[in-house]
């Protein structure tokens, strides 16, 4: 009996040693990877800072292979969904053509908790933030104009900046374009009715969609959730990406593990903070603000305008067909519509295609 106990103890001790060794190896590899990814390219730039923007501090990382390249400002989605916990590896695929700026918008991401917000920003505050960030980057990097690059909420945000201040931008790239909530919801209803023609139960739910509701009630939320789960293609970041996002997560040079865990939804306190600001699960604060920036009837651009959409992007506030219809109405010095197979996030996750499209846009700018 004593021999068995000693033998079991030795096994447990051995397993503990192996576990501790594995953790040490992982942490050392993370430190080495972060160090390598944190290096500045020869002739390039890699700067991280908090910029003074519109009365608060806002985090940015500036990365590029060549300081002479034009500047691309990335506007993340949400509102309130900072993606710096993961997006560095995606954005760097564009750094041959652009100096890329990753920006955590007011109050979120790196800006929390030191520069947290008490109330959700208004549309006017966001636009002023965008204007001041633009001017900061133009002065800091010595550029006359910069390129806007926005995803989802960031797409309508970028579009508004380009419409309001065209003299400051050389192009606007709108990814997974948001246009107008009621119009999008009406298109989603029509699409869901088509998809559910042979499913009486879901067809009945689709008939009950009320496109006029910017902020949905519990009944409407349940309807949209059920239809989304059945018919909308939901991207799996780690499955659909053509980059190894597990490695990108682990070797992120710009975030601590605590920051990454928080952004992945592992901090109840941060999730509650986000929900408080946007108005809870129904986004009672954010959605009316987003709708106030609708671009449905604003189609005259003085800068080149490019749209990149996922072929399976069908949601109640984002419809690929709506982006197509809007693009057809756009009048701009140059415009082009690009497709990437997948859902709402696919245009960011499929970096080979994304970088190819962005390279084409950069070449157009050089030759214009």
Image (spheres, rainbow, N blue to C red):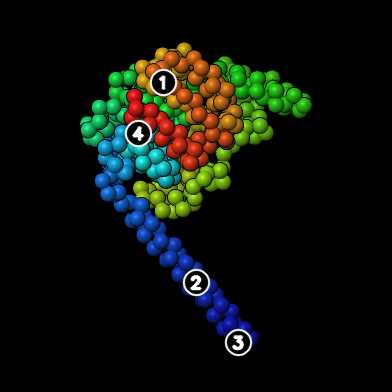
Estimate the spatial distance between the alpha carbons at disc 2 and disc 1, rounded to whole Å: 59 Å
- Tags 2 and 4 in contact by the CB under 8 Å rule? no
Q: Which numbered circle lies on residue 334? A: 1
Select label 2 or label 3 by which is in front.
2
Identify the residue at image location x=47%, y=41%: 351
- Tags 1 and 4 in contact by the CB under 8 Å rule? no
Identify the residue at image location x=45%, y=33%: 357
Mark 1 vs 3, N-terminal side: 3
Q: Which numbered circle lies on residue 18? A: 2
Q: Secondary structure at mark 1?
A: loop
**Which residue bears the numbered disc 4?**
72
Select label 2 or label 4 by which is in front.
4
Mark 4 vs 3, N-terminal side: 3
Select label 2 or label 1 by which is in front.
1
Q: Position of residue 85 (x, y in %)?
A: 42, 45
- Tags 4 and 3 in contact by the CB under 8 Å rule? no
Estimate the spatial distance between the alpha carbons at disc 4 and disc 3, rounded to whole Å: 67 Å
Q: Quadrant of residue 189?
A: top right
Name the quarter where the N terminus is drawn: bottom right
Identify the residue at image location x=54%, y=80%: 10
Q: Position of residue 170 (x, y in %)?
A: 33, 25
Q: Position of residue 250 (x, y in %)?
A: 44, 53
* Crowdedness near tag 1: few (<14), some (14–19) or many (≥20) residues, C-alpha within 10 Å: some
Select label 1 or label 3 by which is in front.
1
Mark 2 vs 1, N-terminal side: 2
Q: Secondary structure at mark 2?
A: helix
Estimate the spatial distance between the alpha carbons at disc 2 and disc 3, rounded to whole Å: 22 Å
């Amino acid at each position: 009996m004593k021999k068995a106990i000693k033998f079991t103890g030795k096994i447990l001790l051995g397993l503990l040693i192996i576990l501790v060794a594995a953790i040490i190896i992982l942490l050392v590899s993370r430190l080495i990877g972060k160090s390598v990814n944190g290096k500045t390219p020869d002739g390039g730039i890699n700067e991280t800072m908090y910029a003074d923007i519109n009365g608060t501090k806002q985090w940015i990382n500036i990365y590029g292979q060549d300081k002479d390249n034009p500047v691309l400002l990335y506007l993340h989605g949400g509102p309130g969904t900072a993606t710096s916990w993961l997006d560095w590896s995606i954005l760097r695929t564009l750094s041959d053509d652009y100096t890329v700026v990753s920006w955590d918008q007011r109050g979120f991401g790196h800006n929390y908790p030191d520069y947290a917000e008490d109330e959700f920003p208004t549309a006017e505050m966001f636009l002023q933030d965008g204007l001041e960030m633009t001017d900061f980057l133009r002065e800091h990097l010595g550029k006359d104009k910069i390129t806007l690059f926005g995803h989802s909420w960031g797409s309508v945000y970028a579009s508004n900046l380009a419409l309001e201040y065209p003299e400051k931008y050389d192009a606007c790239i709108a990814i997974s374009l948001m246009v107008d909530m009621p119009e999008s919801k009406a298109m989603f209803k029509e699409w869901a009715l088509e998809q559910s023609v042979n499913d009486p139960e879901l067809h009945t739910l689709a008939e009950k969609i009320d496109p006029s509701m910017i902020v949905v009630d519990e009944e409407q939320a349940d309807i949209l959730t059920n239809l989304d789960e059945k018919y909308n293609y939901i991207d799996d970041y780690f499955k659909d990406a053509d980059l190894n996002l597990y490695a990108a997560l682990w070797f992120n040079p710009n975030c601590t593990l605590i920051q990454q865990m928080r952004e992945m939804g592992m901090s109840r306190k941060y999730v509650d903070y986000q929900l408080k600001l946007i108005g809870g699960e129904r986004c009672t604060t954010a959605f009316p603000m987003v709708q106030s920036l609708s671009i449905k009837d604003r189609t005259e651009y003085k800068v080149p305008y490019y749209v990149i959409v996922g072929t399976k992007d069908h949601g109640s506030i984002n419809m690929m067909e709506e982006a197509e219809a809007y693009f057809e109405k756009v009048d701009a010095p140059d415009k082009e519509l690009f497709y990437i197979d997948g859902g709402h996030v696919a245009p960011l996750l499929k970096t080979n295609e994304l970088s190819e499209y962005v390279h084409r846009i950069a070449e157009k700018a050089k030759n214009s």
